[in-house]
Image: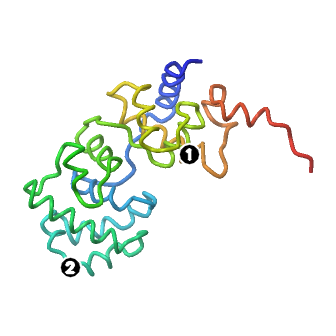
């Protein structure tokens, strides 16, 4: 099967399986999504969602966060990985939003990437989910792993994986395919215990075929 045909098959099957696939970082506006995404680096969405309600209650706006004492932010997010560095990034990000963007979250990869704590992946998350602007495909650990196992890319570098996927899926599906692959990675194609026998893609997935054909080890 050609990669372009495989990509279409993957999209159609996952769309049917996960019709409600979405960003699992809880947020009510672009600013909250931006902050939550910064916090999610090397941390689970579940943990971030436990922390952000209290954080946003204390600092609901860029101005409030920009003026917050560092130790107060550290206390609010101390259960998050690398909370000290992230606290500094949150203050710096909020200050730049005030100084350069009148407190509004910008709508371009370049402007977002200029904010402390923000890289291309975070920019893609914010643009795709807060503004419905498809500038790229979010490649987290789940997307990187599942797309490689499915044979959609031979690369492991996130930027190269993103470029490969962008060639295979229509622009209007870029945000959605990321959610679909993340749902697959979290619910079926789990890193330590992939459930290939339950996967809707098992007949088209090269990795699944290799596993099912592998001889049983003697016990």
Q: Coloring scheme of the render? A: rainbow
| Residue at the right extreme, as displayed | 219
Sequence-first disc among 1 and 2? 2
Residue named by callout 2: 69
**Identity of the residue drawn at 40% across and 59% down:** 41
- Residue at left offset 49%, top offset 39%: 181
Foreground label between 1 and 2: 2
Q: Residue at x 9, y 61 (%)?
A: 99
Residue 188: where, in percent of width, then height? 59, 43
Please provide percent x and percent y for residue 70. 24, 78
How many neighbours does mark 2 have within 10 angstroms: few (below 14), some (14-19), or many (20 or more)?
few
The residue labelled by disc 1 is 187
Q: Quadrant of the N terminus?
A: top right
**Residue 157, labelled with which disc?**
none
Q: CA distance from mark 1 to mark 2?
A: 39 Å
Q: Are marks 1 and 2 in contact (CB under 8 Å)?
A: no
Vertical arrangement, residue 5 with respect to residue 133, above or below: above
Corner quadrant of residue 96? bottom left
Q: Secondary structure at mark 2?
A: loop
Could you tell whether 74 is left or right of 17 in the image?
A: left
**Image side of residue 120 versus residue 182, left or right:** left
In this rendering, the count of numbered labels is: 2
List the single residue furthest toward the bottom: 71
User: What percent of the width, then of the height, locates residue 90?
Assistant: 25, 66
Give the quarter of the image for residue 159. top left
Indicate the secondary structure of the residue bearing disc 1. Answer: helix
Q: Residues within 10 Å of mark 1 (few under 14, many from 20)?
A: few
Q: Quadrant of residue 2?
A: top right
- Position of residue 75 in the picture relative to residue 198 (left or right): left
The x and y percentages for residue 173 are: 36, 29
């Amino acid at each position: 099967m050609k990669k372009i045909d495989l990509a279409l098959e993957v999209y159609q099957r996952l769309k049917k399986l996960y019709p409600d696939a979405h960003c699992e970082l809880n947020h009510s506006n672009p600013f909250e999504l931006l902050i939550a995404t910064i916090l999610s680096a090397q941390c689970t969405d579940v943990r971030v969602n436990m922390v952000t309600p209290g954080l946003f209650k204390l600092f609901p706006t860029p101005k409030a966060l920009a003026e917050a004492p560092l130790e107060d932010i550290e206390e609010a997010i101390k259960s998050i990985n690398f909370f000290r560095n992230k606290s500094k990034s949150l203050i710096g990000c909020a200050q730049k939003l005030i100084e350069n963007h009148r407190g509004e979250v910008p709508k371009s990869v370049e402007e977002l990437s200029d904010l402390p704590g923000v890289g291309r992946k975070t920019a893609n998350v914010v643009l795709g989910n807060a503004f419905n602007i498809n500038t790229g495909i979010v490649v987290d650990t789940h997307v990187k792993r599942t797309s490689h196992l499915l044979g959609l890319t031979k690369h492991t570098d996130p930027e190269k994986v993103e470029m490969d996927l962008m060639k295979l899926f229509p622009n209007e599906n870029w945000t959605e395919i990321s959610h679909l692959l993340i749902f697959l990675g979290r619910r079926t194609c789990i890193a330590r215990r992939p459930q290939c026998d339950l996967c809707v893609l098992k007949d088209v997935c090269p990795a699944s075929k290799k596993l099912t054909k592998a001889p049983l080890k003697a016990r």
